[in-house]
Image (cartoon, rainbow, N blue to C red):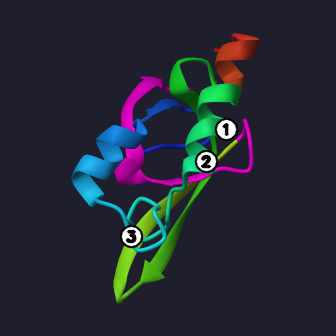
Amino acid sequence: MRYKAGDKVRVKTWKQMEKVHGLNKYGKIGNVYPFSKNMEERVNKNCVDRVVTIRKGELIKRNEKLYTLYSMEEDNFCFLENEIEEIIEVITPINRFEILDIR
């Protein structure tokens, strides 16, 4: 998985995703895990500059292909890796020995 829990990433806009994936017959982004206008509105309302924090990532299998699905801390959102525009901040775990300065 490309991203880890705690990483801050920017979600692509509706127009960016529609251009790449198109719309399905229900008017959602035609992706493996559909992205709706309601989700777009919630991202814009709840996430400053469309930046979200990854809670966890998991592999899902659809149509015999594996995809990485990321859930977010800010809301009950899930995004596929190709719906993320860029990484903003990587959170690296701190080594407990560095905290205690044990040598």
Q: Is residue 90 visible?
A: yes
Span of residues in magenta:
73-91
Q: Which residue is mark 1?
A: 42
Q: Is residue 75 magenta?
A: yes
Contact flag, marks 1 and 2 (Cβ < 8 Å) = yes
Q: Which mark is residue 39?
A: 2
Q: Looking at the picture, does residue 32 appear above or below residue 71?
A: below
First of labels 2, 3 by sequence position: 3
The residue drawn where x is 50% and y is 75% is: 60
Viewer-closest of 16 and 94: 16
Q: Which residue is mark 3?
A: 24
In space, the residues marked 2 and 3 are separated at their CA atoms by 15 Å
Viewer-closest of 9 and 25: 25
Badge 1, how many Cα within 10 Å: few under 14, some, many 20+? some
The N terminus is located in which quarter? bottom left
Viewer-closest of 102 and 39: 39
